[in-house]
Image (cartoon, grey):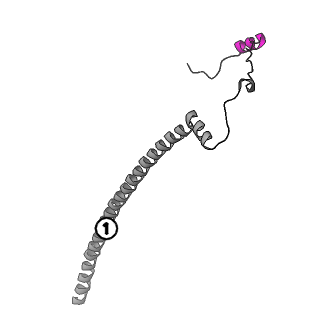
Amino acid sequence: MAKNRKNQAAEIRFGPVLKVVLLCSLIGGAAVGYVWQKNEIYRLGQQVSEREKKLDQLKRDNKRLGDEIGMLESPVMIDRRAKELNLGLAPAQPLQVVRLPELPVAPDQNSARQLAQRPVTGLMP
């Protein structure tokens, strides 16, 4: 009977040891997961701040380039640049300008009736 008691005591000790190992691995895993999560949050925060800085820089560059385009497209600047390049451009002479008269469009009576007779669909009250 003594041998049975020794074997039984070893089996009883194995159970609590297994529980302790599983509990410690669970706590350790949770701790590692917590640290990893905090590290990811920090890393993503750094990426957001870097991208916000880059966005601000791109907005400033876009504004500066838009202002530069506006300046370069101005008639005064175009005239100055044409004179610098000796393109020989000059304003059009009055005989070179052709003016086309714009005729008023007379409403067609049949089309007006057709538009008035069509039911209105798709309008929300």
Query: On the rendered image, what quadrant is the N terminus found in?
Result: bottom left
Could you tell me which residue is drawn at 59 percent across and 37 percent down? Answer: 78
Image quarter in which the C terminus is found: top right
Q: Is residue 120 left or right of residue 26?
A: right
Foreground pick, 17 / 87 = 87
Q: Is residue 86 left or right of residue 1?
A: right
Q: Is residue 87 magenta?
A: no
Foreground of the two, 124 or 48 = 48
Amino acid type indicated by mark 1: Leu
User: Magenta segment: does it hold 124?
Assistant: yes
Q: Circle 1: is it few (<14), some (14-19), or many (20+) Cα within 10 Å?
A: few
Which contiguous range is marked in magenta? 105-125
Residue 18 relative to residue 89: left or right = left
Q: Quadrant of residue 121?
A: top right
* In-image side of 68 versus 34 (left or right): right
Which of 48 and 79 lies nearest the eye of the viewer?
79
Instruction: Name which residue lies at 27% across and 79% down.
Output: 14
Question: Up-down: is 113 above or below 86?
Answer: above
Q: Is residue 100 above or below residue 61?
A: above
Percent of width and height locating residue 99: 73, 21
List x then y, in percent, for residue 89: 67, 36
Residue 123: x and y in percent read: 60, 21
Name the residue: 75% across, 21% down. Answer: 100
Q: Secondary structure at mark 1?
A: helix
Answer above or below: position of 55 versus 18. above
Front-most of 24 and 72?
A: 72
Location of mark 1 (residue) = 26
Relative image position of residue 103 (x, y in whole percent): 74, 15
